[in-house]
Structure formats: structure tokens, C-alpha cells
């Protein structure tokens, strides 16, 4: 995204929700340094995955945030 990063985008989405049901936001990032996960969660993201992402690591995250998403990902694999 040329003008916003994932942190900015997450902040905008969370402000738009304004107390309503939250859209799950999962960070998928090459940043895997100590503290990166906490920074993502503190920014309002729902979960965090460091790249490279494997199906074995992606599946539980999809199951945690939506069964339909997990089934679609499994069908695509």
C-alpha cells in the first residue's frame, strides 16, 4: 500500500468500527523480531503470523477467526 502501512490501516478500520463487532485482522509479515507480535496486537490486529506462512501455521489462525475461512483455504490447498 503506497500511503498506509498495516498499522495505519488497522487503526482506520478500528476507528470506523467504533464499538461495533470487530473485523478480524491478521498480520502476515516478514517482521519476526522480538516485540513485533506485541506491536501488531497493540495496534489492534487480531493475530500475527510471521512469513514464511505454511498451511500448518495458517490453518489454526483461520479456525480461530472463522471456520468458513479455514474450509476455503483447505479447499484451495
Image: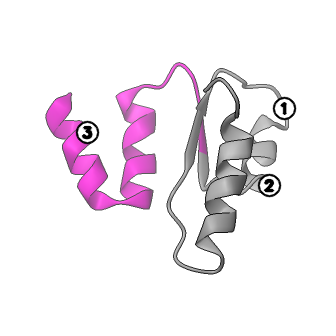
Q: Which of marks 1 and 2 is nearer the N terminus?
A: 1
- Is the image coloured rainbow, by chain, by secondary structure, or in one colour? one colour
Q: Along the polypeptide, which appears first: circle 3 or circle 1?
A: 1
Front: mark 1 or 2: 2
Question: Secondary structure under badge 2?
Answer: helix
Instruction: State if disc 3 and disc 2 touch (CB < 8 Å).
Output: no
Q: In this view, does 67 lie to the left or right of 45?
A: left
Q: Which mark is residue 57?
A: none
Residue, disc 2:
42
Find the residue positioned furthest to the right: 35
**Residue at 43% across / 59% down in the picture?**
65
Q: Give the range drawn in magenta.
A: 48-77
Residue found at x 29% / y 48%: 70
User: Vertically, is 27 above or below 67?
Assistant: above
Q: Is mark 3 on a helix, strand or loop?
A: helix
Residue tagged 3? 73
Q: Which label lies toward us, 3 or 1?
A: 3
- Tag count: 3
Q: Where is residue 52 in the image (x, y as percent from the top left)?
A: 52, 19
Compared to 28, does 72 lie above or below?
below
Instruction: Assess disc 2: are there few (<14), some (14-19) or many (≥20) residues with their C-alpha within 10 Å of its C-alpha.
Output: few
Amino acid at each position: 500500500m503506497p500511503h498506509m502501512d498495516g498499522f495505519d490501516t488497522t487503526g482506520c478500520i478500528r476507528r470506523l468500527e467504533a464499538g461495533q463487532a470487530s473485523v478480524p485482522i491478521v498480520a502476515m509479515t516478514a517482521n519476526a523480531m522480538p516485540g513485533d507480535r506485541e506491536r501488531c496486537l497493540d495496534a489492534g490486529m487480531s493475530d500475527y503470523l510471521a512469513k514464511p506462512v505454511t498451511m500448518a501455521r495458517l490453518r489454526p489462525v483461520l479456525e480461530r477467526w472463522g471456520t468458513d475461512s479455514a474450509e476455503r483455504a483447505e479447499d484451495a490447498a
